Image: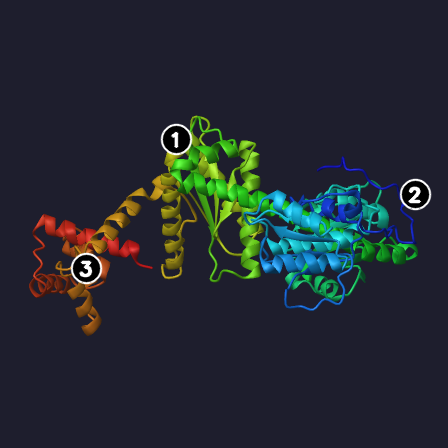
Amino acid sequence: MDKAAPLPDPQQTDRSQSGMQQSVVRLSDCIQLMQADLVHANPTPENLGHPVSDVLMYDPLDSWSSVDDRIILAVGCTFGSPDFDQLLHRAANSNAAAVIVKAHGAKMEQLRSAAVGHSLSVLVAPDTADWTRLVALARASVMGAAADSVSGVRLGDLYAFANAAASITNGAASIVDPLGRILGYSTLPGQPIDELRRITTLTLEETTPPAFDQDFKIVYAAPGAVLVQAPDDGMARLALAVRAGGELLGSIWIIDPGEEKRATALNALDRMAPLAGLHMLHARSASDFGERRNADLIRTLMDDTPHASFAAAQLGLDTANGLAVAAFSIVRPETGSLESVRDIHRLLHLVTTVCNVQFGTSHSALIGSVVYALLPCNGTSPRALHGRIIQEIEAYSHTISSFPVIATVGGIAESIEDLARSRSEAMQTLHHLLNLQSREGKARGKKAPRIALFEDFQIPLDLLKIGAFIEDNGLGGSDGIARIQARDAEQQTDYLETLRAYLASNGNISAMAAQLHVHNNTVRYRVARLAEDFNLDLADPQKRLWLWLRLTTMDLAAK
């Protein structure tokens, strides 16, 4: 936990009875707070000192009464177009603070010349920048720059921000996202806490998801900071929903400092909201970027062999002893809901934590609805270690979801180029176990496995490949299986089951009768009809082999 960021002196925070102080927001303040890789085309002391009051999304069809001191985002405008020229002219004449544009191929000299010609600040954003994120950051920066009492905290450091909030409000602070994850909490000594606070800071998540917690619903519906009454054997809380541009980013929870300090603390929380939003946006952007970068590099390792070595170098992978790809999935009847998203991210956190404990590092990522991890092959028994790791993750899975977790590991990749094969083997095994899970309810008393190494199921997986080859090439059209299935469906007979029993028992009539729960004579009659009606030469070993292969692969592939 980073405690290096400076904290405000409690003796200096009692300003305007709230610990927060309003200040004039300048363009330079906003640029610094946004931290969005903006390039100022024409920086001067005059335009950097221009006051900023708000942010405006540009629409050429809108009529402007006044845009004094606003930052204008030029969505869809490119240098040299009539809309771009009109925008700069109108912005300059309306005393706008700045215009944010994307270059889209224009040279910086051209943009600088246009900015100087209109005496207007022009900020150039990367072509890949997300306008939605930019407008949220810009609005949050305008509001956050006005609340300068905790500006010493590095943007996005939610632990340091929680410490600052705890110092200002005189109560232990926690910052929670909409899924109930604890993003940061204060560590100032001497502030009282209760058992709920201890549990949530240890597990880094709320005991009840916000979507099902009445207290969270009250906080989200309130226009400002509110008092939340104490639970049984606990302490009351002051809480505030944090938003940016109408989007709920999460909430701040403060242990109630007591009746004498409560009003001041509530006021401070309200004033802190803009800066809290700014910090949470930056924390989320940094986290999202890190997760996306990790996922992209791991995807390249597994899918793009020509560039796999580059991705391995970027990740700092130690490939000396080989690697294996592990795959994890949650068996849910539905996907895409808030709960399913929460569960899969919790699974990613669990996998990352276990791998960090075991290997001292973790290379894991969420790609689609599957969590992947790259497992080193250290020691004399790497496969035994891989088996223990996925067993441990599956054993802990009940702490993140009420639904079962499936965990598999592909074969060892001796080189980076072999990781694609290891991933394919992990996914083949994963899909096979998921298929077995779907049949679990039909097989009474038989529990389907939830963890496996690829070699544990290599034979049925190879048979599935053979079955797919047969289907893809139309090789089973004349072997009689389809005709037997049609007869059974039409006349409610059991010839296909009889054929399975015959092949499984090598034609032993007594064993077949016991398996089918019928008399020996009934078995003899059915076998005779099978051979006669469907022209099956069951005495031919090659014919028997083919029929066994067809039925086995069909059964393995059945859902």
Q: Are discs 1 and 3 less than 8 Å apart at CB?
A: no
Q: Earlier in the sequence, mark 1 or mark 3?
A: 1
The amino acid type of the residue labelled 3 equals Ala
Whether residue 304 sits left or right of residue 21 in the image: it is: left
| Residue wearing tag 2 | 11
Give the quarter of the figure containing the N terminus. top right
Q: Residues within 10 Å of mark 3 (few under 14, many from 20)?
A: some
Label 3 to label 2: alpha-carbon separation: 90 Å
Whether residue 103 sits left or right of residue 71 in the image: it is: left
Looking at the picture, does residue 14 appear above or below residue 531? above
Q: Earlier in the sequence, mark 1 or mark 2?
A: 2
Q: Residues within 10 Å of mark 1 (few under 14, many from 20)?
A: few
- Secondary structure of the residue carrying numbered label 1: loop
Which percent across, then down, holds residue 30? 74, 49
- Secondary structure of the residue carrying numbered label 2: helix
- Secondary structure of the residue carrying numbered label 3: helix
Is there any visible trace of residue 209 in the rendered image? no
| Residue wearing tag 1 | 415
- Residue at (80, 62) in percent of width and height: 226
